[in-house]
Amino acid sequence: MTQEAPADIQLGELLIRGGLLGPEQFEAAYRLSFKMRLPIGRVLTMHGHVTEEQLRAALEIQARIRDGLIPFEHAITALLMVSQEGLPLETALNRSGPVAMPTQVPTHNRLGEILTSAGIASQPLVDQGMVTSAETGLPLGLVLLNKGVITRASLNSALAAQRLIREGKVEREAVLYALKLARLRSISLEQSLKETGQFANLAPKFGIGELFVMAGAVSESQLLTAHEIEATHDKELDEVFVELGYASKPCIKAAKHILKMIESGVLFEDQAAQIISKVQYASSNEELQRVLSLIDEDPGAIFEERQPIEITDILKKAGLISDKDLQIATALALANKVPLMKTLFDARLIDEQVLEHATHLKNYLDHDLLKLEQATIVMAYCLENNMTVEETLDTFGWTAPQ
C-alpha cells in the first residue's frame, strides 16, 4: 500500500506497521479466523497477539485515517507509541508530533465558549486546546480533559448544557448561570438548574452509547468523544458512531431494534449487550438479520444459562485427572493457600503443555466456539501428535458449533 492512498489501509497492515504483531502472526490468525468464521480481531485478542485496548486503538486509528482526520504517518507513530510504550491512544496522538502540513485552527468553538463563559477553563488554555485539537483531530473537550484543564464531570456538565441550549429546553443565559453555580458550589448541573427555577431532566437514558459501552464495543473515552461531536456539530449519536468507525450502519440499525426490545420489556440491558457483542463485527445485513431473526423467534434461546466450564472439567473429561485426584489436590491447595493448577502441576498430574492446551481450549469454550466433547478430542490429539490447538483444529476443519 502506498502512502498516497491511506484511506485503503487494512487492519492487518496497520497492526504490523504499528509494531503490534508480525506478518506471520497475522497470517496465521487470518487463516484461523477464516476457518472458524470468526472476526480477525477476536482471534488476535483470544490468542494474546494484541490486547482489547490495542485492537480498539488500531480500529479507531483506521477509522480516523479513512475519514481523513489524521495523516497516515502521524497515525503510525501514535500506534507505535501504543504498542511500544503502552500509552493510551489519546495520549499517543497528543505526543506523536505536529502535523506536517499547515493546520487551520478554528477561531471559535461552541463548547469552548461554554467552558470559558462558565469559568470552567480560561480562554488561553482553550485556545491552546483548539490548536492541539486541530493538529490531532481529537475533539476539544477530550484534549482539555487529557491535559488536565477540566475534569470529566465538568466536561459532561458542559456537554449537557450545550445539548439543552441546542434543543431549546433552557435559555442560554440560564444554562450558563446554572453551570457557573454548579462549579462554584460543587453540585450537579441538574441540581443547579432546579435551584435557579429551571427544570431539566438530565438523568442518563440507556441508549446506543450506554449499550455499546456495556457490550465492550466502545470505551468511556470513545463515548465521550462521540457525545462531544454530537453536541457541537448538531448530529445524532448513531450518525457520529458511524462516522468515527465505532459501528457500521447495519450494526446501528440492529442496535436501534434492540433498544426497542428493551423498552418493550422483551430484553434486559445485559442481554442486549450480549447481542451487540455478537453482531459488532457483522459485515452484512444478512448476517445481522440472521441473528436478529433468531432473537425475535426466541429471545431467551441466545441467553440460556449454563455453568461455566473450568479447566479441571477439560482435564477430567480427557482422562488426565480423576475425581479423587481433584479432591486431594483441592484440599492441598486450600490448606497451602496456593492455586489449584499449581498444586496439580507440583504433583506432576499435569505439565506445562497440558495446562497450555487446556487454558487455550477453555478460551474457545468460553466463547462458544467448541463443545466440551470437541475440546476433549482436541486435547487428546494435541498430546498424541505433539501439535498445537490451532494445528489440530485446522486438521479437523472444525468451526464454531452451530
Image (spheres, grey):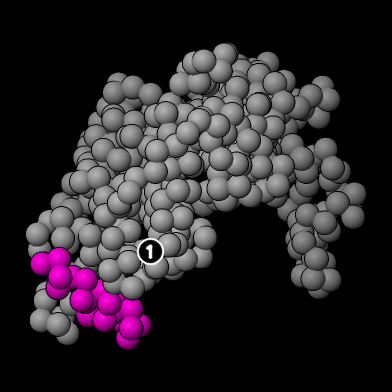
**Residue 356: where, in percent of width, then height?**
77, 40
Residue that carries the numbered disc 1 in the rendered image: 123
Residue visible at 56% across and 18% down in the picture: 3
In-image side of 233 versus 402 (left or right): left
Foreground pick, 320 / 253: 253
Residue 54 in view (yes/no): no
**Three-letter amino acid code at the position of disc 1:** Gln
What range is drawn magenta here?
170-192
Q: Is residue 224 magenta?
A: no
Tell me the quadrant of the picture where the N terminus can be found. top right
**Residue 127: where, in percent of width, then height?**
41, 56
Residue visible at 48% across and 41% down in the picture: 135
Magenta span: predominant SS is helix
Image: 200 above or below 55? below
**Residue 326: where, in percent of width, then height?**
76, 56
Q: Quadrant of residue 97?
A: top right
Binning the other alpha carbons within 10 Å of mark 1 as few (below 14), some (14 to 19) or many (20 upward) gives: some
Image: 135 above or below 185? above
